[in-house]
Image (cartoon, rainbow, N blue to C red):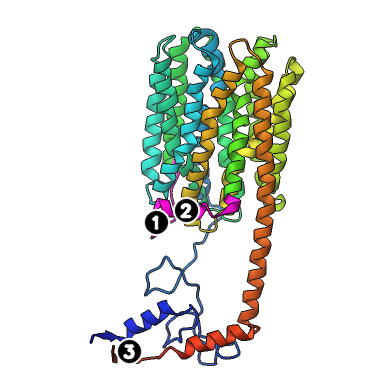
Amino acid sequence: MSRRSSSELQLSSWNSKPQGFFPPRGPTTMAAAPNSVGAPSASESNSTVEPLSPTKAKDDFTVTAPTFPEGGLQAWATVAGAFLIQFCGFGYTTSFGVYEDFYKREYLTQSSPSAIAWIGSINAFLVPSGGLIAGRLYDRGYFYHLIIAGSLLLSFSLFMLSLCQPQQLYQIFLAQGLGAGLGAGATYVPSVAIVSHYFKKRRALAMTIVAAGSSLGAVVHPLMLNNTLRSHLGFGNAVRASAGLVSGLLLIACFLMRPRLPPPAANPPLWKSLKRFSRDGVYILATLGMTTFTVGFYFPLFYLQLDAITHGVNQTLAFYSLVILNTSSFVGRVTPGFFAQRVGVINIIIAATGCGAVLLFCMIALKSVASVIVIGIIFGYCAGAFVTLMAPLIAVLTEDIGELGLRMGVTFGVVSIAGLVGPPLNGALLTGHYVWWRPALFSGLMALIGFFLFVATAVVSQRRAATSRQATSVAAGEVVGEKPPAAVGAANRATSNLEVVPADDTVET
């Protein structure tokens, strides 16, 4: 025979019975027990009804939902810092088209376009895929560790790139592909996710501003590199000047950003989280849509400048083709945030990916100055809208903000596979004879598949929302006493089986 206190017996009864049927004792704040007609009694009307959270301790039934300032000096300083991180990280990655052209025609002339593309594709793979680890560490409270370590590694790798010698593909691959990719990958997801600490209603706007940093970087870096790589400075000094700019901005960003909310008290094992994510159909469709569209997304970023030059377009204009594309992309990243809440994030992504797929097919006919400008402007805007709404879409589909970092990390980790395989496949289809219609057709088809997956995401999301509203309506009817008779009977049976024991008594078992 063992003896248990009344508090232990009551806690055992709470865990074994449906929540909301435990009769309150004194001023304890928990859900009141319904009576036979579904309404609380007079004595229960004074008790405070608060939501319950399974992540809290068993003896703590009060939960305070986090509040969001939706602005303020520190909030916008954090947005500015995250903007600079994106400018220096993913913004440098999407400027690789300048290096692709320079390496192929001057610095790595003995290497094929596909081999050179592996440098940029590994970098493009590591930046978002690093979020699989960085997102997990961010959820555990290691924000500063990731931002500082990633910034140092990115800066160091770019300075090492300036020391690489001509025709030494492996040196450039290690510095620019691996080193810079790992550094930017450590900062990518934390710099986006930290914005969610300060904004909820305006989260889409804040995240689009942050994402616009990479587009602005993809404008500034090509301008700077195209005007310095072929100048009297030479490769080494040109890259060192670029690395100095990146290092200074990263230092400012580290001082601007501040986390606001504590990390979640409980972090479930990674495999359990992945198993739960795999049952979320809308999340899976959105992730697959991002992945397939991204395969085609990188084709203009890596090859537009080379495509224009090989088709006889004026070299000066060809050098500015990526600037035109990324300037339009900057506009495309900023503007959706102002009407995303009204129009819907998924609807904007559907329009952007559909238009982008058509323009990728149009690159088969790229042969003149006008075609370069038109494709650069329109595709740049669509690509900017797509990239800037990737993170907000995941945030919209995430019900628990405590796992946002991990969800973003998993999604970007899968999407990064597209950045890994897309450019080399396009380079292999292109061949050394520059058969441009092959990679354009391949990229357009992959983008079109992504468009249809986003349409499916919208359909399934609407159905889930309708089901959720219906369930909420049923639950609201039960609260006011409109339960079906079977439900009322079950509630009465559950409460009748509980025995209230004074706190000072003990019970024989």
Location of the C terminus by quadrant is bottom left
Q: Is residue 254 above or below residue 427?
A: below
Q: Amino acid at mark 3?
A: Ala
Residue closest to the far right: 370
Q: Amino acid at mark 1?
A: Asn
Quarter of the image containing the N terminus? Answer: bottom left
Residue marked by disc 1: 267
Q: How far apart, in angstroms, are the residues tagged by discs 2 and 3? A: 42 Å
Mark 1 neighbour class, 10 Å CA radius: few under 14, some 14 to 19, many 20 or more: some
Is 268 inside the magenta-drawn segment? yes
Give residue 153's quadrant in the image: top left
Q: Which mark is residue 241?
A: none
Q: Earlier in the sequence, mark 2 or mark 1?
A: 1
Residue beneath the point at 72% across and 28% down: 359
Residues in magenta, as a range: 256-283
Where 312 falls versus 487 (above or below)?
Answer: above
| CA neighbours of label 2 inside 10 A, class few (<14), some (14 to 19), many (20+) | few
Res 50 visible:
yes
Task: Please give the residue where the numbered disc 2 appears in the rendered image.
Answer: 275
In the image, is residue 295 above or below residue 494?
above
Q: Pointers 3 and 1 in contact (CB under 8 A)?
A: no
Residue 106 x %, y %: 52, 8
**Residue picked out by circle 3:** 503
Element at badge 2? Answer: helix
**Residues at marks 3 and 1, CA–CA distance in whole angstroms:** 34 Å
Q: Quadrant of residue 268?
A: bottom left
Residue 117 at x, y percent in the picture: 52, 21
Q: Secondary structure at mark 3?
A: loop
Q: Secondary structure at mark 1?
A: loop
Give the residue drawn at x 57%, y 48%: 284
Q: Please tell me which residue is depicted at 68% across the width and 50% down the height of the picture.
A: 458
Q: Amino acid at mark 2?
A: Lys
